[in-house]
């Protein structure tokens, strides 16, 4: 990874302090990149996916990113943007076991996209 101050490295570590520091660094870098990626929908879609994934275990922390990713997927015809948005939103839906019908619909839509 690279930050504004130069390269950073986050290695898998057995210490939770190191892991938490790497997570915080990753999250900050993704947020920074997301703030300036408005002109590239592919990059924005994957950054939204990464931002959502890094907040998956926070209390509904990934919801905003998932909804933005789905909106982006609906807005752009690009298959990569659509795929990233669908995957991101589908991941968010896994928080709620009752959302099985919506997850199934997303999976079917993703399958259709793969066949296009």
Image: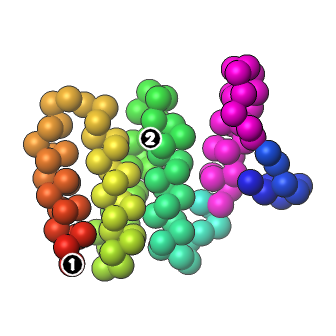
Q: Is residue 12 magenta?
A: yes
Can residue 67 be spotted in the picture?
Answer: no
Quadrant (top left, top right, bottom left, bottom right) of the N terminus: bottom right
Can residue 39 be spotted in the picture?
Answer: yes
- Circle 2 packing at 10 Å, graded few (<14), some (14-19), many (20+), is many
* Residue 57 versus residue 16 in the image, above or below: below
Q: Is residue 29 magenta?
A: yes
Q: Which residue is mark 1?
A: 116
As helix, strand or loop, the secondary structure at mark 2 comes to loop
Position of 71 with respect to 45 (left or right) is left
Q: Residue lying at the far right in this picture: please name it.
A: 5
Q: Position of residue 12 (x, y in %)?
A: 69, 33
Position of 71 with respect to 56 (left or right) is left
Q: Position of residue 110 (x, y in %)?
A: 23, 61
Report the residue at 52% width, 51% height from top: 50
Position of 37 with respect to 8 (left or right) is left
* Residue 24 versus residue 31 in the image, above or below: above
Q: Position of residue 14 (x, y in %)?
A: 70, 21
Asked if the residue at tag 1 contacts the one at tag 2, i.e. Cβ–Cβ closer than 8 Å, the answer is no
Q: Which residue is mark 2?
A: 62
As helix, strand or loop, the secondary structure at mark 1 comes to loop
Q: Position of residue 68 (x, y in %)?
A: 40, 57
Quadrant (top left, top right, bottom left, bottom right) of the C terminus: bottom left
The residues colored magenta run: 10-33
- Circle 1 packing at 10 Å, graded few (<14), some (14-19), many (20+), is few
How far apart marks 2 and 1 lie (CA) works out to: 29 Å
Q: Earlier in the sequence, mark 2 or mark 1?
A: 2
Report the residue at 14% width, 58% height from top: 108
């Amino acid at each position: 990874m690279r930050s504004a101050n130069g390269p950073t490295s986050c290695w898998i570590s057995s210490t939770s302090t190191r892991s938490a520091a790497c997570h915080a660094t990753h999250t900050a870098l993704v947020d920074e990149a997301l703030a300036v990626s408005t002109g590239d929908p592919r990059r924005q879609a994957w950054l939204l996916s990464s931002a959502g994934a890094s907040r998956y275990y926070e209390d509904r922390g990934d919801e905003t990113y998932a909804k933005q990713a789905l909106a982006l997927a609906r807005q752009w015809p690009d298959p990569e943007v659509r795929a990233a948005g669908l995957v991101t939103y589908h991941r968010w839906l896994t928080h709620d076991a009752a959302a099985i019908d919506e997850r199934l619909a997303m999976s079917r839509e993703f399958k259709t996209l793969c066949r296009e």
